Image (cartoon, helix red, strand yellow):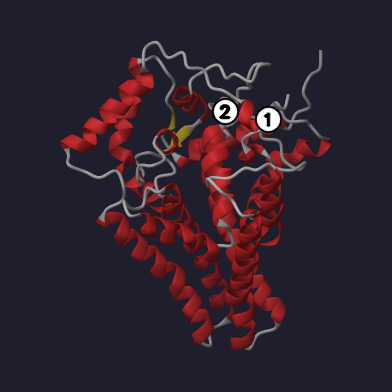
Amino acid sequence: MQIAKGAIRFSRKDRQQFFSTLNKRVNAYFKENNLRKTGNWRLHLKTAILLTFFITPYVLLLSLDLNQWVKLGLCVLLGFGMAGIGMNVMHEGNHGSYSSYPWVNKLMGGAIYILAGNVFNWKVQHNILHHSFTNIEGHDEDLEAGTIMRFSKHAKWRKIHRFQHLYFIFLYGLMTLRWVITTDFIQLKRYLKLNLSYKKKTSPTREWFVLFLSKSFYVSLWIVLPLLVLDLAWWKIMIGFVVMHYTAGIILSVVFQLAHITTTTAMPLPSETGTMKNTWAIHQLFTTGNFAPKNWLVNWFTGGLNHQIEHHIFPYISHIHYKNIGKIVKQTAREFDLPYNEFKTFRSAFYSHYSLLKSLAKKPITV
């Protein structure tokens, strides 16, 4: 069943007032502790550390005559830096949670241009479609994986899916490479055709110009400049480029998938009239999950995306607050007898994701 995106409606029946109660409690937390909901010095310090981690390998590669294996290792580090900047800086900037100043958010969100992406596409696909229609087949593009992967029982089964639990991790590494080559162009064409936008007024000419200009800058920075500076065969430079993206792709894909594609998260469909069973906030509890909430390294590096429940309900709040407001969300969910999906460790979440892929690899039994 495919319903126009604008036709989906969430139920307004929340007699116990879960979301309003949760909102009041979270707002009270910030007021009582005299805190802003946006980032603070800790996020700024993290930004400096991650930018250094990202820029340093690039500078070393271009300026020093290093062993080729060392260069390859630096490309791996670039991939880690790329993922870190994406999850902590770009992500918060484009959600408007990095700073209370719009221009700062715009600057930080613009980091996506050096990571291969596009701001317009990201805000439509992630902020609007994914956050609004989380885990709804045919509406949340994070569930779409072409024909080679099957993330939902509502998706069509194909013979190739029989082995998806064996090859999925290899495909995940291609995520950001697809941004560079095809995804952004395909998405922009589709979004403009469907008149999807986060802006009041969109200029197709402007968006295409920005896309081609940013892609030209990206290719110049990561391919043309190394070709001009380094005394290396072009194919070796391309290997380094692919290694960087493959590293970032695996990290980003796994983090995103563990938040929604597991055995504990639901993938509900709307009724024939396009109405969802639950309110938007309660829907987020059913379709989203946390993992490794007490692991400081996972929390620090992923930009709090392991606290995905808090992020989905409060996308305008910086991730540096998730650990504390998570206690409020968890307690409130339990009071209202609502789910709070949480894996204590990264390993248990990954196994759950693997188990779901394995079960979806089996041909559905038709009655």
Q: Position of residue 18 (x, y in %)?
A: 37, 19
Q: Residue 74 placed where, x, y %?
A: 52, 72
Instruction: Tell me which amino acid carries mark 2.
Output: Thr
206 shown above or below 285:
below
Dividing the image into 4 quarters, which one contains the C terminus? top right
Image quadrant assignment for residue 156: top right
The picture places residue 295, in percent across and down from the top left corner, at 36, 44
- Name the residue carrying label 2: 263
* Mark 1 neighbour class, 10 Å CA radius: few under 14, some 14 to 19, many 20 or more: few
Q: Residue at x 54, y 40 (%)?
A: 128
27 relative position to 317: left or right: left
Q: Position of residue 266 (x, y in %)?
A: 56, 25
Residue 4: numbered disc: 1
| Label 2 SS | loop
The residue at 70%/83% (across/down) is 233
How many other residues sit within 10 Å of disc 2, few (<14), some (14-19) or many (≥20)?
Answer: some
Residue drawn at 74 percent across, 43 percent down: 146
Instruction: Of the two numbered discs 1 and 2 on the same chain, state the one appearing first in sequence.
Output: 1
Dot 1 amino acid type: Ala
**Vertical order, 3 against 243 (above or below):** above
Image-quadrant location for residue 119:
bottom right
Query: Horizontally, is 15 left or right of 241 in the view?
Result: left
Number of numbered discs? 2
Whether residue 50 is visible here, answered yes or no, is yes
Marks 1 and 2 sit apart, C-alpha to C-alpha, by: 28 Å
